[in-house]
Image (tube, rainbow, N blue to C red):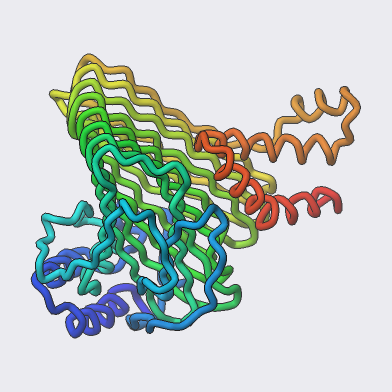
Amino acid sequence: MKINEVTDNYIKELELIAKSDVQKSALSFFKERGLPHTKMEDWLYTKVTDVVPESFKLAKTDSAKEVESPLGEYSLYFINGSYQAQMSKLPSEIQLETISTNDLSIADYLDDTKDIFGMLNASVNSSILKIKVPKNFVQEAPITIIHQATEANSYSTPRIHIEMDIHSQCNFVEIFQGADDLNYNQVSVTNFTLKDGAIAKHIKVQTEGNLAFHAGSVNATLKRDANFKSFTFNTGAIKARHNLQVKLLEPGAEASVDGLYTLAGKQHCDNFSLIHHDAEHTDSSQLFKGVLDESARGVFTGKVLVDRDAQKVNSEQLNKNLLLTKKAHVDTRPQLEVYADDVKCAHGATVGQMSDEEAFYLQSRGLSKERAQKLLIHAFCADAILKIEDTQIENYLSNILFESFEKNVFEHLKQGQ
């Protein structure tokens, strides 16, 4: 079925779901673009007709066994996109509320209205989960947000809005998971509002099942002297799309938007980021690294936009990719759009195979060829993970990296493939 026919099917179902004004507004934006296709500039290398179902169906709330939070006692649970209050626990100082979309307008959302799956998400959600971290509150241990998908041929659509008050500090680790051999679709939106001096980390861990489609959006706005650190770790799903948008609204705001994607088989991962410097004296950095085995495909589009009045801006962006086979492929597009004249901006991208010189050097120090290759792959990945700057979370991701990717890659090396 052609993508425009699938879009028509979706619109018929979405019109039955969208009741509030904000849902109808989101649906109108979805109608303007329809489902994505490769003639769209922002979807140039990623088609979805091979993964999305021909008709739209929301996943039903399901009961599932509680899984232990891997990073401490504080956690929020979602099953098929529905929040599970009875399974969740937060520090008493943090306020949690469910807000009806009847009380909201599309202007209350941080979403880019051109974000197709973000608008699809907004059109079906009759409420949002809002997390408020109070003024001057510092939460040392990370808060884990766990999403489980259990229903095939359907959409889970969780939406979370996080508000960080003045000089508050909190780390969030958001985990997406589901069973292998289950065709399901996860379309998530997580939005951050950081007030003056607030500090937030958001670590997204995408470990979906091997037949899943994942489309997730993270949006953040930063006020004066706020600091936002985002890390996207992708190792699951047959096809994934990550949309990241950060707006630096006032002087002193700083953002670090980093990620690691490790792909094998026929996996496809598309990372699309936009960092918008609205104000002077704002800083941003990006480091996205990819390791691709077998016939995997990666896409990186990173755009930095600097407004005319945003002088004294520092921004750097780098995308590095390591291809382990001749069939693996990467398309990378780092972009700068600068209208100010007193800025320091740099961007770059590399795509290549393992360095023979580095492997030879390690072998000359007594390592076997296989051991040298393993060390180079692990070091390449670890360089990205260390950007998180939290030992507990780094160790957690390193374990997932080994179990979900490195173990199989190292076995291929051992077999001489």
Residue 9 x %, y %: 27, 82
Residue in view at x 14 percent, y 56 percent: 108
Q: Position of residue 309 (x, y in %)?
A: 13, 23
Q: Is residue 369 visible?
A: yes
Vertical side of 49 occupied by 229: above or below: above
Which of these two is toward me, 323 or 263? 263
The answer to whether residue 327 is visible is no
Relative height, residue 365 to residue 191 (above, below): above
Residue closest to the far front? 92
> x%, y% of residue 93?
31, 51
Side of 264 relative to 297 (left or right): right
Is residue 2 shown above or below 145?
below
Image side of residue 235 versus residue 272, left or right: right
Residue at point 54%, 53% (across, down): 71
Question: Dividing the image into 4 quarters, which one contains the N terminus?
Answer: bottom left
> Left or right of 394: which side holds 331?
left
Name the foreground residue: 136 vs 178: 136
Q: Quadrant of residue 170?
A: top left
Of the pair 82 and 256, the residue shown nearer to us: 82
In this rendering, the answer to whether 326 lies above or below 117 is above
Q: Residue at x 29, y 79 (%)?
A: 5
Looking at the image, which residue is at 10% across and 62% down?
Answer: 105
Q: Position of residue 49 (x, y in %)?
A: 41, 71
Nearer to us in this view, 68 or 406: 68
148 left or right, relative to 94: right
When asked about the image quadrant of residue 119, the answer is: bottom left
